[in-house]
Amino acid sequence: MFKPQMIAENVKNIQENIKTACIAAGRSPESVTLIAVSKTFNYNGIQEVIETGVFDIGENYVQEIVEKRQKIPDERIRWHFIGHLQSNKVKYIAEWVDLIHSVDNVNVAVEIQKRGAQLDRVVDVLVEVNTSGEASKFGVKPEETLELIQKISLHPNLRIKGLMTVGPFLPDPGQSRPAFQTLKRVFDEVNRAGIVQNPLVHLSMGMTHDFTVAIEEGSTMVRIGTAIFGSRKKFTSN
């Protein structure tokens, strides 16, 4: 359970839960990366997370990830952009972001390719898939994922590392299982099709309320915010 102002203890508890879920699923705990999602929280919380040895930090908004990177120039941090990405915002993060989790259309992929080519950099991305069918969620439809990947995999400055999804927020975490199973099925289909130069390796799925279920279904990256930092609030740089 989340305890306010006890970030280090929260991280430890989550890591123990990840370990338990992995062992139960017959997996190595090292196969799952914990991404601390600091959306709307200021710099002190991120510093506390870093002190625990967790260096994967996720953000939902371009303005926040840019400002936080400027304020915390720690080269050990791996910055993950996990929110919806508009083409006109790619230029602000393309030079240094470690992984973009939310590519779901050709236009944003073209812009990533353009910026990557200008920077002489290959940008790692995940393709976001809407596995719940909810209109409020972004992501390509599962049945259209293969076609999208075929198109964007032709860009040499964009490297597709895997898939991402947001499970439905339901009272029973187990109700998210079908969404995670769908993502794993699409993941396997893409790899069997051999349409990417290197096989997909990452399944980014699972958040505070359902990450243990996601691990059971093959997640390699869990995105945890509330259970580390607490309830969301409006971000200010003060």
Image (tube, grey):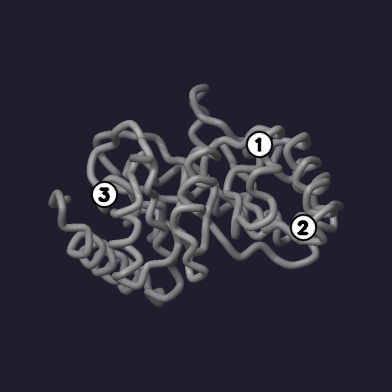
Give the mark nearer the N terminus: 2 vs 1.
Answer: 1
Give how far across and how far down residue 91 sits, in percent: 71, 43
Residue 164 in sight here: yes
Q: Amino acid at mark 2?
A: Ala
Secondary structure beneath disc 2?
helix
Give how far across and how far down residue 77 sits, in percent: 48, 65
Q: Residue furthest front?
A: 238
Q: Amino acid at mark 1?
A: Lys
CA separation, marks 2 and 1?
Answer: 32 Å
208 or 148: which is nearer to us? 208
Which residue is at 29% across, 54% downward? Answer: 45
How crowded pointer 1 is (Cα within 10 Å; few <14, some 14-19, many 20+) is rated as some
Secondary structure beneath disc 3?
helix
Q: Nearer the viewer, mark 3 or mark 2?
A: 3
Which residue is at 84% across, 52% downward? Answer: 118
Q: Which mark is residue 3?
A: none
Give the mark nearer the N terminus: 3 vs 1.
Answer: 1
Location of residue 27 with respect to 202 vertically, above or below: below
Give how far across and how far down residue 105 sits, in percent: 72, 35
Q: Which mark is residue 229?
A: 3
**Which residue carries the number 1 mark?**
89
**Which residue carries the number 2 mark?**
193
Location of residue 195 with respect to 21 vertically, above or below: above
How crowded pointer 2 is (Cα within 10 Å; few <14, some 14-19, many 20+) is rated as few
Give the mark nearer the N terminus: 3 vs 2.
Answer: 2
CA separation, marks 3 and 1?
Answer: 26 Å
40 or 138: which is nearer to us? 40
CA separation, marks 3 and 2?
Answer: 40 Å
- Whether tag 3 and tag 2 are in contact, CB under 8 A, the answer is no
Residue 150 in sight here: no
